[in-house]
Image (cartoon, grey):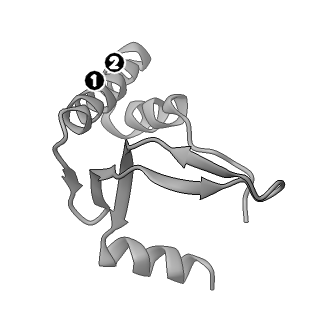
């Protein structure tokens, strides 16, 4: 498995190479898309990207957790969490990449 992480700069460089926009325009485009996705998720809506997957927000209820080191019970506050469900095409592509 690779230790490489895909960054915003990598995405904007890919847009620069594929689309032909300037580097600044490519970076602004990537930032704009990521900002829009973040805004939609913050509003509690889901984001579906065809052939990639679906991002969503889920509410988790309060519960009692346990510190594994001490065994002490600790209350965990209710919170919203980000979820991702990959599409079947993405699952197949990732699975085939391991072969």
The residue under label 2 is: 28
Mark 2 Cα shell of 10 Å, populated few (<14), some (14-19), many (≥20): few
Q: Residue at x 20, y 55 (%)?
A: 48
Q: Nearer the viewer, mark 2 or mark 1?
A: 1
Q: Is residue 33 above or below residue 55?
A: above
Residue 90, horizontal then vertical, whole percent: 38, 71
The residue under label 1 is: 32
- Considering depth in this image, is 40 or 66 the residue closer to the camera? 66
Q: Residue at x 53, y 55 (%)?
A: 64
Q: Is residue 97 above or below residue 17?
A: below
Residue 97, horizontal then vertical, whole percent: 56, 76
Taking 97 as reference, is 15 left or right? left
Taking 4 as reference, is 48 left or right? left
Q: Residue at x 29, y 26 (%)?
A: 35
The C terminus appears in which quarter of the rendering?
Answer: bottom right
The N terminus appears in which quarter of the rendering?
Answer: bottom right
Taking 83 as reference, is 74 left or right? right
- Considering depth in this image, is 35 or 27 the residue closer to the camera? 35
Residue 29, horizontal then vertical, whole percent: 30, 25
Residue 20, horizontal then vertical, whole percent: 34, 30
Mark 1 Cα shell of 10 Å, populated few (<14), some (14-19), many (≥20): few
Q: Residue at x 27, y 31 (%)?
A: 33
């Amino acid at each position: 498995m690779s230790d490489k992480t895909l960054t915003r700069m990598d995405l904007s460089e890919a847009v620069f190479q594929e689309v032909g926009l300037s580097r600044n325009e490519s970076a602004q485009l990537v930032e704009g898309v990521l900002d829009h996705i973040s805004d939609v998720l913050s509003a509690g809506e889901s984001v579906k990207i065809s052939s990639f997957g679906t991002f969503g927000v889920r509410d988790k209820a309060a519960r009692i957790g346990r510190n594994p080191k001490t065994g002490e019970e600790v209350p965990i506050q209710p919170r919203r969490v980000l979820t991702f469900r990959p599409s079947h095409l993405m699952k197949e592509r990732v699975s085939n990449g391991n072969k």
